[in-house]
Structure formats: structure tokens, C-alpha cells
Image (cartoon, rainbow, N blue to C red):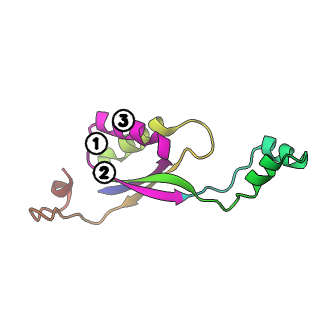
Amino acid sequence: MKEVIAVVRMNMMNRTKAALNEAGIDAFFAHEAQGRGKGFVSANVLEGAESGYEEAAAVLGEKGKLYPKRMLTIVVPDEQVDEVVEVITTANKTGKPGDGKIFVLPLGDAVRVRTGEKGKKSIS
């Protein structure tokens, strides 16, 4: 089993949810999150700030700002990981900074509280 954690833009959540459902992946958690990447700065913003535009300078001053995101947590069998990653990537890729990140972690075990089922049975 693996845990797939995806951080995506807020406005891409409905598209991501629909894509996961269409792929037969119905069980996941979605959390509100805040974060930021390494801080890509557009050349246009730098030029604007150097030219004295206050709006551009204000954007540069937001370097430490955290942006609203959605964090998805999906637990799947090992053989389904590539599909989940592909579905999330396809639904969220715009080619611009901020498209998101996907992390895949090993998962030791899972237990369904209601029945006591463990392992793959608990997530199917």
C-alpha cells in the first residue's frame, strides 16, 4: 500500500475530484492547506519593480506569503499508484508555477475500524 499526497490549486479541486472519480478512485481526503514553492519570480515583475511600478514592488514584497491550496490524501494498492499520479498530474497541469506537488509514501498497514479488516481489504 502507498499513501499519495497531492497539493493542488484550490480552483483545480473540482476537476481533480471528477478525474479521480472517473478513474474509479472514490475514496480520498481533502484538506485545506496553505503553502508556497521556492518563489519563482516573473521577469516582467522584476522589470516592473525596477521601473518603479508600485504593484510590481508589492508582489516582490510578498515573498513569504502563503497561498491557499488543497491537500489530497489517497491510500491505494501499490499497483494503482502510477494511475493515481497520472490522473492528478493530468487534471492539474497548466505548465505554470504553482501547479502542485505529489508525494508517494510507503504505508505499513491500514485498519478499517468498523470491521477490523487490515491491509488491502481495509482500503477496498
Number of residues whose C-alpha sits closer than 10 Å to that of mark 1, classed few (under 14), some (14–19) or many (20 or more): some
- In front: 82, or 101? 101
Q: Secondary structure at mark 2?
A: loop
Q: Which residue is at 61% across, 55% downward?
A: 37
Please provide the residue range marked out in magenta: 5-34
Left or right: 1 with respect to 49?
left
- Cβ atoms at labels 2 and 1 below 8 Å apart: yes
Q: Amino acid at mark 2?
A: Phe
**Residue 120 screen position, x and y as percent:** 20, 55
Residue 1 occupies quadrant: bottom left
92 in magenta: no
Q: Is residue 87 visible?
A: no
**Residue 30 screen position, x and y as percent:** 37, 53
Q: Which residue is at 34% across, 39% downward?
A: 20
- In front: 41, or 76? 41
Q: Secondary structure at mark 3?
A: helix
Residue 28's disc number: 2
- Cβ atoms at labels 3 and 2 below 8 Å apart: no
The residue lying furthest to the front in this view is 54
**Residue 32 screen position, x and y as percent:** 43, 56
Q: Is residue 11 visible?
A: yes
